[in-house]
Each structure stands twice: as C-alpha cells, then as structure tokens.
Image (cartoon, rainbow, N blue to C red):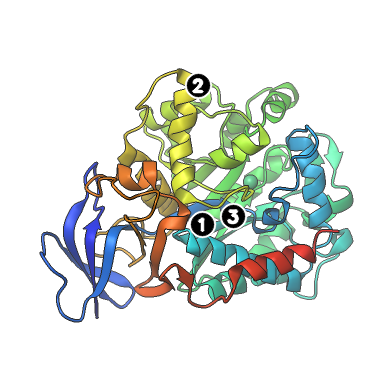
C-alpha cells in the first residue's frame, strides 16, 4: 500500500482537482480522494500537476538514430526512407537493445509509461533468421524492462516491397517466409506483467490483402491489438486505389482487419468514406503529427474522426521529437492552421488521446486516475519557465503549455521510474543515446 498526494490532478474533463490522494495497492489505484487539504503523513508528494501516464501508441525505436540527420537536402518521405534503410541494415541485436533502452528511457523521461513498438526489423542481414527468430523482438522486450516502461510489441507482417515488388536489400530483414511463418514466430512470444504481444500489418503496400486476412485472423483469434500504417502518404493512398481499386482502409476492412481492437496509424489521406468506415467498425486512429509534419505527410482529418466517434491516440513514430504534450497539442495546432480557426478540439480530448486513447489501443487497463486502473501517472512542474503562471486548475496547462522537460516524476504500476527529472534505472540517458547512435551511423 502506498499513498501519493497530488497538489493538482486531472481526473477527467476540462478542470483538474486540488489535493488528490491516490491510494495504490500492488500495481493498481485502489482509491482516489479529492479535496484533501494537505498531504497525509507518509504520503509521497507530487507538487504541480499530475496526469495519467502518457501512452506512446506508435514507435519505431531505431528511427531515433535519424533525428536531425535528414534535413540537409530537400526530400520526401521516400528519400528519408533511404537513410532509415541504411540504419536498418546495420542494426544487430546488441545494438538494438542498447539503442532501444536509451530511447525508451527518453520516453520515460517525457512521461510515457507505455509504448507500442511497431516492430518490423526481425531478422539478420539478408533476411537470415537469428538462432531464435524472435531475437530482435526480445531485445525490445529487454530494453523496455530495463527502462521500466510497459511495452506492447506490435510485431509487423511485412512481405513485399511494393504493390508488385518483392522485398529487396534492407527490406529482406523485415520479412517472414509467409503469413503463416509470421504467425508461427509471433505465437512463440508471451505476455508478462509489463509486456503485451500484439500484431501489425505493416501497410497494404507491404502486405497483400490475402496475407492481411491471415494476420487479422491470428490477431482476432488470439485477442491481440492489431495496428497498421494506413494512408500516411498521398502516393501510398492513391497507389492502393489504383492497384486494388479501393482505399487502404477499405482493403484492410475487406481482409477482416477492422474491429474495436484495430488501430489505423496516420490516416492522413482518409476519404470521408474511410472516416465513416473506421467509426462504424469501432477502430481507433493513432495520429503522429510531429512525424507527419517532419516528413511532409499531410494533415489527417482528426477532427472528423473524433466527431464520428473514433478514439484517437498519439505516437512519436520516427522520434523526430519525443514529447507527448507536443504530440497532443500538434493535433490541435495543425487543425487550426489548416482550418483557419481556433478551438478545434477541447484540451481534455487531446489529453484523452495522449493517455486513455493510447493505453486502450495498446491493450492496457490504464490511462485514467480511477480506482481499479493500473497505477501509472506522470507529474509535471508548474514552476518552470514554460509553466509558471499557467493555471494548474485546467488540463490545458499540460496540453497547451507544458513540454517533456517539465516532467518530474513518472510512476509505472505504483513504482517510480523517474524522480526529480532523472531516470532511476538508466544512467546518463544522453550518453547512451549518443553512443548507441554513433555505432549505427557511418
Ligand atoms: Zn510508423
């Protein structure tokens, strides 16, 4: 039993509560009491503003190596992808573990308590499996455990290099023999207290509809979350319409992929029919706006999706930056610029995307400060140069003013992993990032 006393805490809605006492038993919140004037004796104090732990619903850990390195020449998603492939061709399990541990520690420092790793870097150079064909996935499991955050390993089926192209070069590492081989490999991975195994269809570009059927069947029979990149790039969306005669989302629907366990990642070029389709099947949508703007992907119809009842989540995806507050804020800011209007989303809806929306998409019973939920929370300071003078009585204080640099304390399952803004298990996260990236970039 442990008591945590929050000066201000967000329990839902536009406003926050003062003097909130969280009683934590084992790894869950046992009770929540509001309006307590002072911290009881023995309680852990959380000054400032406390929120549920943030969920990073879409990550490719090794893309962190590209940050700041792809801006010298004008380019596109596709030229960015060339450098990504050159890094992908060099990563081995030891280096993957080291880089991912540092990246997950960076996420923890930013207030994320769970990450959905969309994992497609499976095999050795040339596509030759390691002795354990899940060695790369297990490196990610170990990385998350050592950084202290929850991991949903979304193991991605990836079988072709384009609508009519086989895998080639670095892509050979991403593939499996076929969809049955993928399912057989993924079935050997197990859940633990802090790990969920999920499935992914890399994209309809990389997986033919007939193979997507197999992945969808495996995910639904095993009760696993299923994610897919959908309509990130206009070329990809239009190419699918030209080749398959339907949008990527419609092709995934025909393959049986859409359900309340499905998350469409991106959706930047969704048609109005796609928005309706996703809503009617109960699927969610993961926006990755800091990556989408970095890559020039376009701005998704997130307001229309939200209005239609689609649960939104956020992901830092390529890790151009790792800041859940900025990710949530960017959904609103992009919509403002595109629509020439303010107040497109209520701040609490953005907060829900960054917390409960992502946790649900990743299969975790977390994301709100409520009895029975997993005891994951993040505490931000309200006396930094960014947050001083901002009203902590509004959740907008976090969503529209704070940044990852304001995170002080992060608790996962009732246990702190960040205290005083320092990671408790990974020393010198900066050095770990620099050293692990140096070994991959030549
Ligand atoms: Zn992605």
Distance of mark 2 from mark 3, alpha carbons? 33 Å
**Residue placed furthest toward the front:** 385
Front of the two marks 2 and 3: 2
Q: Which mark is residue 415?
A: none
Q: Nearer the observer, disc 1 or disc 2?
A: 2
Q: Earlier in the sequence, mark 3 or mark 1?
A: 3
Q: CA distance from mark 1 to mark 2?
A: 35 Å
- Judged from the image, the secondary structure of the residue bearing numbered disc 3 is strand
Tag 2 residue: 338
Q: Which residue is rendered at x = 37% and y = 71% of the image?
A: 413
Left or right, 344 with respect to 149, comes to: left
User: What residue is drawn where x is 17% and y is 56%?
Assistant: 18
Label 2 sits on a secondary structure element that is helix
Residue 216's x, y, as percent?
A: 59, 48
In the foreground, 309 or 74? 74
Horizontal side of 153 relative to 42 (left or right) equals right
Of the pair 248 and 428, the residue shown nearer to us = 428
Q: Are marks 2 and 3 in contact (CB under 8 Å)?
A: no
Residue appearing at x 56%, y 47% in the figure: 227
Q: Quadrant of residue 77?
A: top right
Distance from label 3 to label 1 (Cα)? 7 Å
Mark 1 neighbour density, 10 Å: few (under 14) some (14–19) many (20 or more): many
Quarter of the figure with the N terminus:
bottom left
Examine the image and state in which quarter residue 218 appears: bottom right
Q: Which mark is residue 199?
A: 3
Pick the front one: 350 or 142: 350
Image quadrant in which the C terminus is located:
bottom right
Estimate how packed mark 3 is, as few (under 14), some (14 to 19) or many (20 or more) residues with alpha carbons within 10 Å: many
Residue farthest top in this picture: 340
Percent of width and height locating residue 223: 48, 57
């Amino acid at each position: 039993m442990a008591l945590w006393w929050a000066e201000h805490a967000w329990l839902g809605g536009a406003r926050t509560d003062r003097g909130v006492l969280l009683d934590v038993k084992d790894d869950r919140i046992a009770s929540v009491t509001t309006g307590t004037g002072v911290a009881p004796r023995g309680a852990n104090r959380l000054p400032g503003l406390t929120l549920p732990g943030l969920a990073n619903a879409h990550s490719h850990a090794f893309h962190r190596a590209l940050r700041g390195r792809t801006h010298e020449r004008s380019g596109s998603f596709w030229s960015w992808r060339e450098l990504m492939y050159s890094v992908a061709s060099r990563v081995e399990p030891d280096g993957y573990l080291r880089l991912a541990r540092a990246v997950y520690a960076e996420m923890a420092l930013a207030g994320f308590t769970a990450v959905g790793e969309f994992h497609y870097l499976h095999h050795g150079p040339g596509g030759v499996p390691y002795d354990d064909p899940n060695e790369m996935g297990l490196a990610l499991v170990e990385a998350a455990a050592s950084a202290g955050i929850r991991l949903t390993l979304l193991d991605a089926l990836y079988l072709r290099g384009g609508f009519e192209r086989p895998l080639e070069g670095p892509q050979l590492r991403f593939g499996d023999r076929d969809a049955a081989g993928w399912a057989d490999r993924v079935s050997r991975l197990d859940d633990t207290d802090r790990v969920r195994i999920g499935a992914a269809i890399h994209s309809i570009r990389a997986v033919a509809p007939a193979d997507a059927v197999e992945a969808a069947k495996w995910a639904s029979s095993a009760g696993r979350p299923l994610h897919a990149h959908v309509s990130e790039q206009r070329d990809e969306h239009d190419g699918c319409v030209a080749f398959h005669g339907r949008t990527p989302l419609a092709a995934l629907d025909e393959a049986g992929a859409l359900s309340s366990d499905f998350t469409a990642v991106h959706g930047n070029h969704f048609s109005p029919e796609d928005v309706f389709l996703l809503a009617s099947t109960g699927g969610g949508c993961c926006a990755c706006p800091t990556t989408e703007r970095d890559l020039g992907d376009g701005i998704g119809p997130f307001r229309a999706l939200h209005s239609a009842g689609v649960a939104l989540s956020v992901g830092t995806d390529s890790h151009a930056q790792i800041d859940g507050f900025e990710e949530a804020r960017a959904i609103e800011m992009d919509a403002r610029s595109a629509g020439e209007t303010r107040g497109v989303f209520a701040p609490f809806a953005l907060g829900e995307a960054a917390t409960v929306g992502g946790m649900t998409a990743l299969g975790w019973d977390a994301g709100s400060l409520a009895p029975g939920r997993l005891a994951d929370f993040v505490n931000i300071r309200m006396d930094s140069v960014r947050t001083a003078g901002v009203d902590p009585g509004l959740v907008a204080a976090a969503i529209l003013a704070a940044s990852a640099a304001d995170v002080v304390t992060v608790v996962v399952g009732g246990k702190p992993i960040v205290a005083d803004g320092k990671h408790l298990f990974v020393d010198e996260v900066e050095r770990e990032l620099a050293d692990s990236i140096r070994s991959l970039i030549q």
